Image: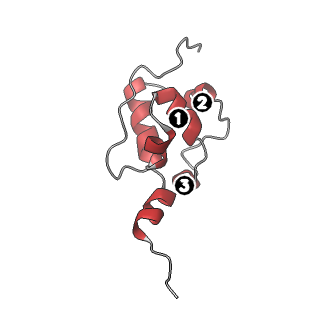
Amino acid sequence: MSYYFEVLPLHPKPKEFELFTSYINRLLELNQITINELAKLAKEPALNLQTSTLDYGHYGVNSIANLTGHTVEQISQTTLLEFMHRFVREPQN
């Protein structure tokens, strides 16, 4: 299937405390596309919801930001790395 758009037609902002994989699932459902189609649009061939590590890093964040028209910062906030930065404090000496 061929697509002729740079931003997904339906691209809501991530919900507060929504994880990256949940956000991806929501985008898939709203736009009625598969993960393989999204990976192709995002130019991220290894984008795969079976891999729970998506929530832990920043893999695919830039591409999803481009496809949704949201900032990298907004999409990054859906990763567990961002949650850890908010809630885990560095030990003080």
Name the foreground residue: 61 vs 41: 61
Disc 2 target residue? 42
Q: Furthest residue to the bottom?
A: 93
User: What amino acid is labelled 3 in the image?
Assistant: Ser
Residue 31 occupies quadrant: top left
Label 2: element kind: helix
The total number of labels drawn is 3
Name the foreground residue: 49 vs 55: 55
Disc 1 target residue? 64
Name the foreground residue: 80 vs 93: 93
Sequence order check, earlier mark of 3 and 2 = 2
Q: Position of residue 90 (x, y in %)?
A: 50, 76
Label 3: element kind: helix
Labels 2 and 1 touching (C-beta < 8 A) = yes
- Residue drawn at (58%, 51%), measured in percent from left and top? 51
Q: Is residue 78 above or below residue 4?
A: below
Q: Position of residue 74 (x, y in %)?
A: 43, 42
Residue 9 occupies quadrant: top left
Q: Position of residue 82 (x, y in %)?
A: 47, 57
- Residue drawn at (44%, 50%), measured in percent from left and top? 77
Q: Which mark is residue 52?
A: 3
User: What amino acid is labelled 1 in the image?
Assistant: Ile
Labels 3 and 2 touching (C-beta < 8 A) = no
